[in-house]
Image (cartoon, rainbow, N blue to C red):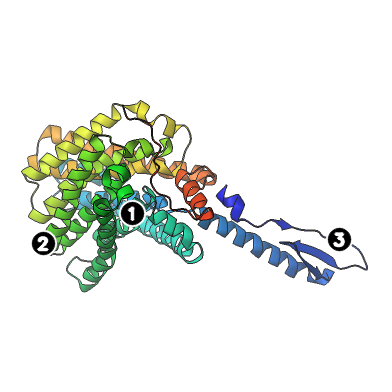
Amino acid sequence: MAAQSCQSEIEQVIQYSSSSPVTISTNNNDINYDQQSLPTTTMIILVDRLLNSLRSIVTKFHAGYFRISLSLGGQALLWKKFMGPRTTNATHSVVLMINSTSTFLVLWSFALFTLIFLSLIYLLKCLFNFKMVKAEFLHHVGVNYLFVPWISWLLLLQTAPFLAPTTPTYLILWWIFSVPVVLLDVKIYGQWFTKGKRYLSMAANPTSQLSVIGNLVGAQAAARMGWRESAVGLFSLGMVHYLVLFVTLYQRLAGGDRLPAMLRPVFFLFFAAPSMASLAWESIVGDFDMVSKMLFFLSLFLFLSLICRPMLFKRSMRRFNIAWWAYSFPMTVLALASFEYAEEVKGGIAHVLMLLLFGLSVLVSLTLVALTVINTKMLLPDNDPITTTLFHSTRNNLLPLVSTTTTSPH
């Protein structure tokens, strides 16, 4: 596969003789060393192997791995909400039992470290394997995950324990993280209007909703620092395209059938977008009003519709893969929306629903962290559908356009 093609084979031929030197063959180039230089030779071999391993990681890595940082950033926002001053007595008693302040600081630090680590790996990919980055930008699924690093940074910016929204540093960072989202919007939405094979009806798939979520998270961050007009602008941009995208995906014209079975957990993004929209609108108007409630009920309905169809995810759950992290962030933003709803209506049923979704969100995230630690060898599989497509596209000098051969949705 991709890793096997990019890795160089290291052949070591060490001939022990009292009169002959040591011969080591690396990439068909013979190098002779005296026996006294064996430590240096060993170090060269280890460095070469390390570089080959790093090359393999960089080749297999793609923006979809930022699902992890996205989920952790969402959890940090959830815990910060639970620490807020508006928490009711029923919620406050639960928060006290689990020591939310310490948990939040540990979680935020872990999310920041994870995001920095993933960003460094992707930066290496941009430097040393830019052809695959370009192929990812042209891939109908991969391009949507290019929003995720910036969404993750915006979530961590909102939850930073040492940075107030009114500070100049917050403003500068908001610009740094929001501008790439808008630029990607211009590129992707422009393609939907103008390019034949990239019309929305041909390119739409559930991951396309990440572009909408990027605008909504940017709007929420802008509203927190008092930039209401910018927040409304990003919110309107996201919601208009969400309505068009939702109708397109609901009609099942083409996009859903092009999605590999391994990536079906991304169907949870169907209720992540309206959940995030309800939170963004609440940040803009300062109240969880009727619009926010409508969006919350829509997300709750879509969530129930998906969990009632477990067979849809059967094939994707046979073996652990990084796509499982797509379950976490939608559950987190739904729990956040339920929190705001419970704070608004102050009813018993609403608070029970909020606590159930909060517990389920935390359980899903903890389970995914544990599975990721246990299955570290499976994090970079050879059969990753995105990596495989990108690698063959760069080898054949082909653009990974949307496939024209799909099965009928009916």
Q: Secondary structure at mark 3?
A: loop
Q: Is residue 24 above or below residue 312?
A: below
Task: Judge whether residue 94 can be spotted in this image.
Answer: no
Q: Which residue is mark 1?
A: 148
Q: Secondary structure at mark 1?
A: helix
Q: Secondary structure at mark 2?
A: helix
Where is residue 120 drawn, in percent x and y? Answer: 44, 63
Where is residue 314 drawn, in percent x and y? Answer: 41, 29
Determine which quarter of the picture holds residue 325: top left
Q: Which residue is mark 3?
A: 15
| Mark 2 → mark 3, Cα distance in angstroms | 73 Å
Q: Earlier in the sequence, mark 1 or mark 2?
A: 1
Q: Residue at x 11, y 56 (%)?
A: 284
Q: Earlier in the sequence, mark 1 or mark 3?
A: 3
Tell me the quarter of the image containing the C terminus.
top left
Please tell me how many numbered marks the rendered image carries.
3
From the viewer's perspective, tell me whether residue 343 is left or right of residue 23: left
Q: Disc number at residue 249?
A: none
Q: Which residue is mark 2?
A: 228
Task: Judge whether residue 218 can be spotted in this image.
Answer: yes
| Mark 1 → mark 2, Cα distance in angstroms | 23 Å
Q: Residue at x 36, y 35 (%)?
A: 257
Where is residue 283 drawn, in percent x and y? Answer: 13, 54
Determine which quarter of the picture holds residue 115: bottom left
| Mark 1 → mark 3, Cα distance in angstroms | 52 Å
Q: Amino acid at mark 1?
A: Val
